Image: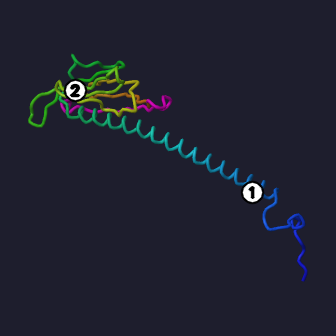
Amino acid sequence: MKITPSIFSKFKKDKGYTLLETVVYVGVLSVAILAIFAILFSITRSFTEARIYNEVEISGSTAMERMVREIRTAASVDEGNSILDIDPGQLALNTTDEAGTAKTIQFYFDDTTNTINLDDNGTDKGSLTGSGVEITNLVFRRSDTPKSSIIKIEMTVRSKRKTTLSAKFYDSAVMRGGY
């Protein structure tokens, strides 16, 4: 049985690769490396965007949950210290602590940091949102019925790192003193 020589065998005098084979291997390897880097870049960008989106969602949800919880336990709205129906709003609530002592809780917009801050009976408790986000809209609305009072909250949270990413949050709560 006779084995027919390959097309490259007449050019090969020793063992090794020809110039053409080397160029083909380098070309294929270059394309594979470029594809891997493109995939890694895409994954990194997606991860960063997901992390920023998560930060906006967590900050907005946490701030909203805290405000709703305080509204539900409040007896009434302090009308003199509240700014309702406009942006930026401010909400002051008359409530009691665990011992039953009267106190005031206030949610206000801090225009130097663009955050929502909490004031608990005259003591600033700091920001309700994370450091990577800012509040671009905060409105408190009050609706009264013969048997209850409800506070509606409208808030927009935007990322400081990617300013095109923002999320709107809406919630409402009935005050315990309102029914």
Q: Mark 2 packing: few (<14 Cα in 10 Å), some, or many (20+)?
A: few
Residue extending farthest to the top is: 80
Quadrant in which the C terminus appears: top left
Residue extending farthest to the front is: 14
Q: Earlier in the sequence, mark 2 or mark 1?
A: 1
Residue visible at 91% across and 80% down in the picture: 2
Q: Which residues are magenta?
A: 160-179
Q: Is residue 34 left or right of residue 86?
A: right
Q: Nearer the viewer, mark 2 or mark 1?
A: 1
Q: Amino acid at mark 1?
A: Tyr
Residue 85 on image: x %, y %: 34, 19
Q: Which residue is mark 2?
A: 124
For the residues marked 2 and 1, what is the alpha-carbon distance in whole angstroms?
A: 66 Å
Residue visible at 23% across and 23% down in the picture: 92
Quadrant hosting residue 115:
top left
Q: Which residue is mark 1?
A: 25
Residue 118 on image: x %, y %: 25, 28
